Image (tube, rainbow, N blue to C red):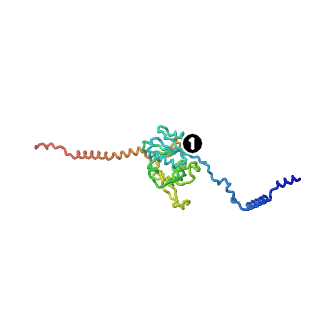
Amino acid sequence: EVRRAELEEAEAPPEGDAEADADAEEANNEEEEVAPSDPYLLADAAYIQKDTRWRNKQRTLVFCSRGVNYRFRHLAEDIKKLLPHHKTEPKFEKSSKLHEINEVCELKSCNNVVFFESRKGEDLYMWVARVPYGPTLKFQVHNIHTTGEVRLAGNCLLGSRPVLYFDKAFSDISYLKLMKGLLTQAFSTPRNHPKSKPFHDHMMCFYYLDKKIWVRHYQIAPETPSNENDPERQVLTEIGPRFVLDPIRILAGSFSGQTLYANAFYMSPTALRVQAKKLLKSPYKRRLEVKEERRQREKAAEFPEDPLDEAFI
């Protein structure tokens, strides 16, 4: 019995520990009485939780053909810097067929392609296509000014997502609606892309004027540092590059298929050069015609020979 009493005394908690447990229970009861900080359980709501997964798997292949000059190559590099979701490929051989680009896109797991084709070393064409089923846009590129060439004041963070702006004509004209959709898929950076930054600090603008598409690139910056969170107090500063796209045709497939739209106002560079040469030759031809007309007038003004002129010599 003495041994049993000693064991019971050893197993019994000390008086100080019992008082501490009682204080802890009272504190817990007081916390339960206080209103919870998240009464609507918003932290556990799945529908408003931030989605950090890359769901829109858009990849754009950007490359050019062999034979491009330095300005065309710099333009392609500027386009790559604007698209964090781009993939590159060595230069495309001129002897290859355009439909082989579909196989290259399949190997690169790309569903959009921006292909710069150079002809005669002075004419640049841009193909924008949706792979593998189309459609395909074909443009001729004019008035190219690269970022390093113009040296504008704007700047943006490499990898940030651009805001795409299309003017009112892209919502009214049927074939421009199709161009808007295809350009949006090719140039818009998907949300949560691994190589992109999660904010917007620059804008790509597409304007339709004189039957052509004018492309400009601007930085979005606040007027003053205190207005950085005010959307009404933002200003645009041009960054570059800048160029003009002259639409040629729209194909139903990917680099093939039926022609959905053909620009009736488009003239090929070869036709323009031939016309310019004719205009340069016309002054010389005109001078020859004037000389011939004067010779004919002088011949018509001559008097007929008089047989009596030699009678009184």
Callout 1 amino acid: Ser
How many C-alpha atoms fall within 10 Å of the one at disc 1: few (<14), some, or many (≥20)? some
Q: Which residue lies furthest to the left in this view?
A: 312
Q: Which of the two residues, 157 or 29, is positioned nearer the viewer here? A: 29
Q: Is residue 295 above or below residue 232?
A: above
Pinpoint residue 217: horizontal percent, then vertical percent. Answer: 49, 53
Q: Residue furthest right?
A: 1
For this view, does 134 lie left or right of residue 291? right
Image location (x, y in percent) of residue 291: 27, 46
- Which residue bears the numbered disc 1? 109
Q: Which residue lies furthest to the top in this view?
A: 95
Residue nearest the observer in this picture, 189 or 147: 147
Is residue 295 left or right of 151 when viewed as pictured?
left
> Going by the image, does 282 lie left or right of 210?
left
Q: Name the one closer to the observer, 259 or 228.
A: 228
Quarter occupied by the C terminus: top left
Q: Residue furthest front?
A: 2
Count every numbered label the image shows and give the total. Answer: 1
Is residue 67 in sight in this rendering? yes
Residue at 49 percent of width and 38 percent of height:
97
Q: Is residue 270 above or below residue 206?
A: above
Is residue 211 depicted above or below 232 in this figure?
A: above
Is residue 174 in view from this perspective?
no
The quadrant in which residue 268 appears is: top left
Name the element at disc 1. Answer: loop
